[in-house]
Image: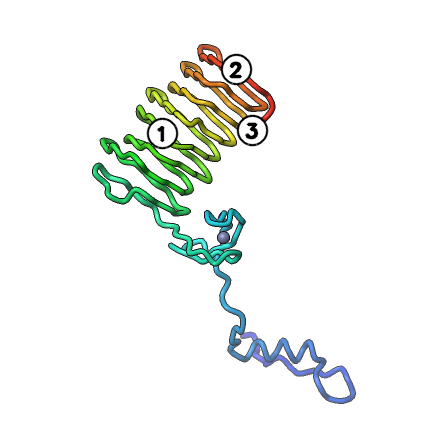
């Protein structure tokens, strides 16, 4: 049988007091610590849709206040059904126009937007705008990445300003792409493009001018 013995207090200094670090260690072992700082909340960075600046918000929050302009930012996802009455949507979340919807005069500001149905109006998407059915969009379009899916025939009467455009279907309109334009095999792009990089894959079509510089 091993013999149990408590840890002896050996004080190596003449004063008889434990060194401070050892004393703190023992106090920590024998007391319940009360955390003074608030628990760490996972944060994520978003771009405020009012002032355009980056701000940190709790990752799981459904709404937050911009630390710069104090705007109330919504983060919920919104589905727009056929016959939807709400035409102006501002959220950092996703907006989906559901199949069979035909909505005009939309004003959408969001993170990602998915057009499974028809939606026309103004689009400002900080990340992705994905169009997967025939659409004629009468307002300005801004997105991080614009994707036109195979089988979709899209007309942008006021064009689009994006970082990146990927066309797998058919797209007409004036395109300003800060990073690049890619026309996938089978894709058709009828557009004057202002972009530093234009890639037209084999079996893809591009008709229009290509300017490497951004328009003034
Ligand atoms: Zn702001």
Q: Tag 3 or tag 2, which sits nearer the N-term? A: 3
Residue 95 is tagged as: none
Residue 138 is tagged as: 1
Q: Give the colouring mode of the picture.
A: rainbow
Q: Are marks 2 and 3 in contact (CB under 8 Å)?
A: no
Q: Residue furthest bottom?
A: 15
Task: Write the residue at 39% across / 50% down.
Answer: 75
Q: Is residue 56 above or below residue 190?
A: below
Q: Nearer the viewer, residue 158 or 41?
A: 158
Q: Residue furthest front?
A: 216
Find disc 2 in the rendering and name its residue: 209
Quadrant holding the C terminus = top right
Q: Secondary structure at mark 1?
A: loop
35 relative position to 123: left or right = right
Q: Tag 2 or tag 1, which sits nearer the N-term? A: 1
Question: Residue 74, how many percent across, how many down?
Answer: 39, 52
Query: Depth-wise, is mark 1 or mark 2 nearer the camera?
Result: 1
Q: Tag 3 or tag 1, which sits nearer the N-term? A: 1
Residue 179 is tagged as: 3
> What is the distance, in whole Å, between disc 2 and disc 3 at their CAs?
17 Å
Q: Nearer the viewer, residue 163 or 61?
A: 163
Question: Residue 37, how many percent across, how many down?
Answer: 54, 70
Q: Is residue 90 above or below residue 57?
A: above
């Amino acid at each position: 049988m091993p013999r149990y013995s408590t840890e002896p207090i050996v004080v190596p200094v003449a004063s008889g007091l434990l060194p401070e670090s050892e004393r703190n260690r023992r106090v920590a072992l024998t007391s319940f610590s009360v955390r003074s700082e608030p628990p760490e909340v996972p944060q994520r960075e978003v771009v405020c849709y009012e002032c355009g600046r980056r701000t940190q918000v709790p990752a799981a929050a459904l709404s937050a206040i911009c630390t710069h302009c104090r705007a109330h930012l919504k983060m919920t996802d919104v589905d727009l059904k056929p016959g939807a009455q709400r035409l102006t949507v501002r959220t950092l979340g996703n907006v989906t126009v559901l199949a069979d919807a035909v909505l005009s005069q939309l004003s959408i500001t969001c993170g990602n937007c998915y057009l499974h149905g028809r939606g026309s109006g103004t689009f400002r998407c900080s990340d992705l705008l994905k169009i997967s059915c025939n659409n004629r969009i009468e307002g300005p379009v801004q997105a991080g990445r614009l994707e036109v899916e195979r089988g979709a025939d899209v007309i942008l009467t006021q064009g689009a300003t994006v970082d990146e455009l990927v066309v797998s279907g058919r797209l007409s309109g004036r395109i300003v792409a800060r990073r690049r334009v890619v026309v996938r095999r089978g894709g058709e792009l009828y557009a004057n493009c202002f972009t530093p990089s234009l890639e037209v894959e084999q079996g893809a079509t591009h008709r229009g001018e290509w300017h490497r510089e951004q328009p003034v």
